Image (cartoon, rainbow, N blue to C red):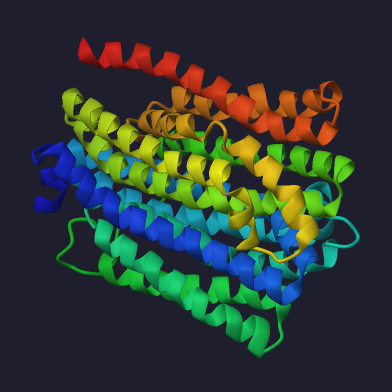
Amino acid sequence: MSRTAELGTAPVRRLLWKYAMPAIIAMTATSLYNIVDSIYIGHGCGALALGALTVSKPFMDICAAFGSLVGVGASSLLAIYLGEKDYDRANRVLGNVIVMNVILSAIVMAVGLIWLDPILMAFGASENTLEYAHEYMEIILYGNILTHIYFGLNAMLRSAGHPRFSMTATIVAVSMNIVLDPIFIFGLDMGVRGAALATVLSQAVAVVWQMTKFCDRNELVRFHRGIWRLNREITGRAIAIGMSPFLYNIAHCFVVIIINNQLIRFGGDLAIASYGVINRLTFVFAMIVMGLNQGMQPIAGYNYGARRYDRVLRSFRLTCICATAVMGVVFLLGECCPRLVTEVFTHDPQLIGLTVRPLRIICSTMLIIGFQMVAGNLFTSIGMAGKAIFLSLTRQVLYLIPLALWLPMVFADPLDGVWWSIPISDALSAITAAIMLTVQVRSLRTQ
């Protein structure tokens, strides 16, 4: 109980450091794994396999979206209930997370396996990349239940006052993955199937590790009888809060489908592989910002439940400053040494040449993306589902999709139009977030 009570009493700066650093370390480790995984696949299976991984990503994001629908919403709700001192409902949230994740992940797995090839083709797979993408996603879908439970329990651990334990679970999964990847890809000659199998097995071990904490009888939030029956109020509120990251991920998937199809139309398979390289770089730093957001979430949620709005705003300001500094690094990397960054992922001279210019274009607005991400997370953390959902959809649906379709018709080089649609939509969505945030901050200060 003392671990959760400190969220309302300890200095906000120290709390953010305590909760964000384990999350940042965990997210950075995950980012580095994704880079290492791409390097293994790019060098061990070829450029087409790297393109297939890019094509598979939106499908994986859809699977993750259903996990975030439950995990993110429930973890925010758990923090709010703990702030309200409602420990019975807090425990019921834990049981409901497991049950909902099992149900949703089983449905996603069944649908994905039945229509796997048509889905991958819709996401931009060509005759050259379909086989690789199918082999990779088939294994990932079989392990989908483990993936959902892993991400859901990690979110619950942070809100229950165990950020370091959550970090350890992630590091266990990432470390095993990095060790198993070369064994399965090169040693056993399993190719992309080996990379997928390494991911699933690593998450299985992490789930066992997470379960040990929630089975501890000394914990305030733990597994016990009476928490497993689905509660309409808890599931309804959790899904409503989690709808923001869910819709964001779903919208992002459709955006990637459109961009992949535009890229293959105007640039071919290597343009998609180029997009994959850029995503891997920006993903590393975006994951650090997500770690900051995860550190802020229990602090903001608890204090909002306790009606300590000054502490909510203080946690937001500190997180926003840190996030801007992080994205400033990727801005400098993308603008100052794009070729050097690209060569980390591939030795293919044609792919390197195709990646340098779009990397500079996409990194041009990185300085404002940190603020945009933290602003959206604030609304999710304090349970304002409607505003969080609106912010989630503005960048993807309102700005990026129309721009990705329209700008190729305006630019002399249509491929440039596809690349420029990304930073322009980022700028517009940051302006929208700033307006909404200004209104909300005024409201909190008057309460």
Depicted 74 relative to depicted 60: above or below:
above
* Figure quadrant of residue 109: bottom right
Is 132 displayed left or right of 360 in the figure? right
What is the number of callouts on the image?
Answer: 0
Say left or right for 434 vs 159.
right
Residue 228, compared with residue 328, is above or below; it is below
Q: Which residue is depicted at the point 40% across and 51% down?
A: 96
Specify whether residue 404 is in view: yes
Is there any visible trace of residue 224 in the rendered image? no
Q: Residue furthest front?
A: 336
User: Residue, x 37% and y 49% (percent of image)?
Assistant: 291
Foreground residue, 242 or 158? 158
The C terminus lies in which quarter of the figure? top left
Q: Is residue 221 above or below residue 443?
A: below
Place of residue 162 in the rendered image (x, y in percent of width and height, measured from the top left): 24, 58
Image quarter of residue 188: bottom right
